[in-house]
Image (spheres, coloured by chain):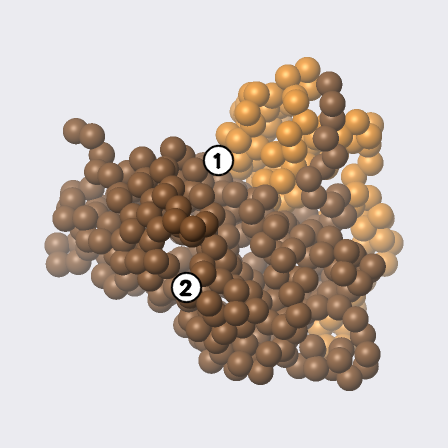
């Protein structure tokens, strides 16, 4: 039997013993992100350790740095909720002045990026700092007890958007920070998911090698906040791609007319015109993604809310220039 | 049997760690969280069948801890000191070489 080499470096930058819940998708994302980053730094500068991390408050900060211990094996600084991007800009400027080679990774959750840290992020992207911003999107403030963030999808249960007689849960559409970042016309913006780790690693490496700012938004499952089974974490993330809930795309230099869209898989038919994806016909209904999660359980009593969610997903894909057909489940 | 990539970290934190407060609350030993043996959280434990393994590395890639490392022949080795028993490895294994069984103490 021919044995392939491991597809990713075996150097570890994220140590075990951290306090993340069992089955945490975000922990997987950070483990892969640091490995991809070190591979990219080795290829670009010849030094796999030529990076540092500034991280906003959030789940992954709280679980990885329980004083006096740390799970990180790279220089790492914890900053407040709103200024991961600002701190990373400062580190980058200092490295430039000192003539150090390498790249800075800024990490924030969806609350620390989409809500609280948005203006620091915008400033960093606009000043063209040589920083990669990684947003791990678990779609609510999981660290403080599952409150809604602006990245929470339509219809989801959270403690501050409880469904009931007069409410269907979260009643506003999800905010796509990747599109906001792309509007800054920065060199590289991408969305990724832990449901497709090879794609995520490729995008992280590309982001790390770009000269100038880059932004990656990665979809991570949270078994605690999504009320999903522990072992299904990766499966749910993969279903999000296959049902069309989570698009995988890359935007370079803010060119919205040439968005690269990755094939979602799961039997979906992709129609291309001149190398560009113009239409996708999904084969799996979004119900397959929703039914695995307790946070969407109430939607099955209100089918019109699921139809509303379908319309919102179509509108999101339309922004990317793709007409999608989302099937309904067979009766 | 392969050695854990974190063996040096475990030895260092056992030797150097002290209760003294550091200036600026700096955690000065990288990867010192290895002192927390999170394996005690586990309810189900993964059981590995080496003969079924095709070395696709999916368990190694997905493990959030990481409690899976590779031995000399690139087979996965499970680190039961840290495995929290989430079962993602068993769920994603394409050949069912990993099976979750109830932990017995």
Left of A154 or right of it: where is B97? right
Q: Which chain carries label 1?
A: A
Q: What's the distance in space between the residues labelled 1 and 2, CA to CA?
A: 39 Å
Q: Name the residue under label 1.
A: A231
Q: Quadrant of the C terminus of chain A?
A: top left
Q: What residue lies at 65% left-to-right and 55% top-to-bottom? A: A205
Instruction: Categorize mark 2 by other alpha carbons within 10 Å: few (<14), some (14-19), many (20+).
Output: few
Left of B57 or right of it: where is A139? left
- Of mark 1 and mark 2, the one earlier in the sequence is 1
Q: Mark 2 lies on which chain?
A: A
Q: Can residue B43 be seen in this view?
A: no
Colour-to-chain, orange: B
Q: What residue lies at 73% left-to-right and 18% top-to-bottom? A: A1
Q: What residue lies at 48% left-to-right and 35% top-to-bottom? A: A231
Position above or below: A227 against A119: above
Q: Residue A121: give x, y in percent of width and height.
A: 51, 76
- Color of chain A here? brown
Mark 2 element type: loop
Q: Residue A56: give x, y in percent of width and height.
A: 56, 70
Q: Mark 2 points at which residue?
A: A257
Left of B36 or right of it: where is A133? left
């Amino acid at each position: 039997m021919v044995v392939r080499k491991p597809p990713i470096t075996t150097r570890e930058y994220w140590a075990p013993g951290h306090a993340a819940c069992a089955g945490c998708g975000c922990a997987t994302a950070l483990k892969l992100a640091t490995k991809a980053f070190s591979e990219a730094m080795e290829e670009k500068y010849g030094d796999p350790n030529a990076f540092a991390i500034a991280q906003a408050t959030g789940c992954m900060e709280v679980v990885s740095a329980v004083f006096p211990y740390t799970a990180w094996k790279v220089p790492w600084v914890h900053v407040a909720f709103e200024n991961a991007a600002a701190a990373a800009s400062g580190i980058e400027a200092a490295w430039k002045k000192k003539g150090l080679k390498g790249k800075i990774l800024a990490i924030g959750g969806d609350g620390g990026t989409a809500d609280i840290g948005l203006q620091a992020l915008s400033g960093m992207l606009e000043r063209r700092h040589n920083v990669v911003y990684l947003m791990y999107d678990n779609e609510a403030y999981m660290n403080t007890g599952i409150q809604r963030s602006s990245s929470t999808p339509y219809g989801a249960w959270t403690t501050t958007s409880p469904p009931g007689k007069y409410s269907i849960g979260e009643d506003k559409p999800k905010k796509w920070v990747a599109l906001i970042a792309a509007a800054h016309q920065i060199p590289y913006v991408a969305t990724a998911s832990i449901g497709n780790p090879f794609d995520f690693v490729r995008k992280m490496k590309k982001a790390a090698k770009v000269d100038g700012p880059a932004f990656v938004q990665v979809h991570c499952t949270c078994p605690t906040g999504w009320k999903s089974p522990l072992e299904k974490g990766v499966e749910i993330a993969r279903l999000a791609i296959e049902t069309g809930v989570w698009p995988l795309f890359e935007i370079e230099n803010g060119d919205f007319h040439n968005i690269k869209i990755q094939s979602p898989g799961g039997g979906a038919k992709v129609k291309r015109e001149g190398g560009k994806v113009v239409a996708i016909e999904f084969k799996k209904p979004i119900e397959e993604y929703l039914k695995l999660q307790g946070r969407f359980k109430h939607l099955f009593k209100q089918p019109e809310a699921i139809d509303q969610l379908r319309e919102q997903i179509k509108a999101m894909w339309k922004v990317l220039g793709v007409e999608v057909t989302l099937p309904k489940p067979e009766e | 049997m392969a050695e854990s990539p974190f063996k040096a970290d475990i030895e260092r934190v056992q030797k150097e760690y002290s209760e003294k407060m550091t200036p600026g609350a700096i955690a000065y030993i990288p990867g010192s969280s290895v002192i927390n043996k999170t394996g005690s959280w586990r309810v189900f434990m993964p059981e590995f069948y080496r003969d079924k393994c095709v070395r696709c590395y999916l368990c190694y890639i997905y493990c959030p801890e990481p409690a899976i490392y590779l031995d000399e022949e690139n087979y996965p080795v499970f680190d039961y000191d840290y495995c929290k028993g989430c079962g993602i490895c068993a769920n994603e294994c394409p050949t069912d070489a990993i099976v979750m069984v109830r932990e017995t103490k």
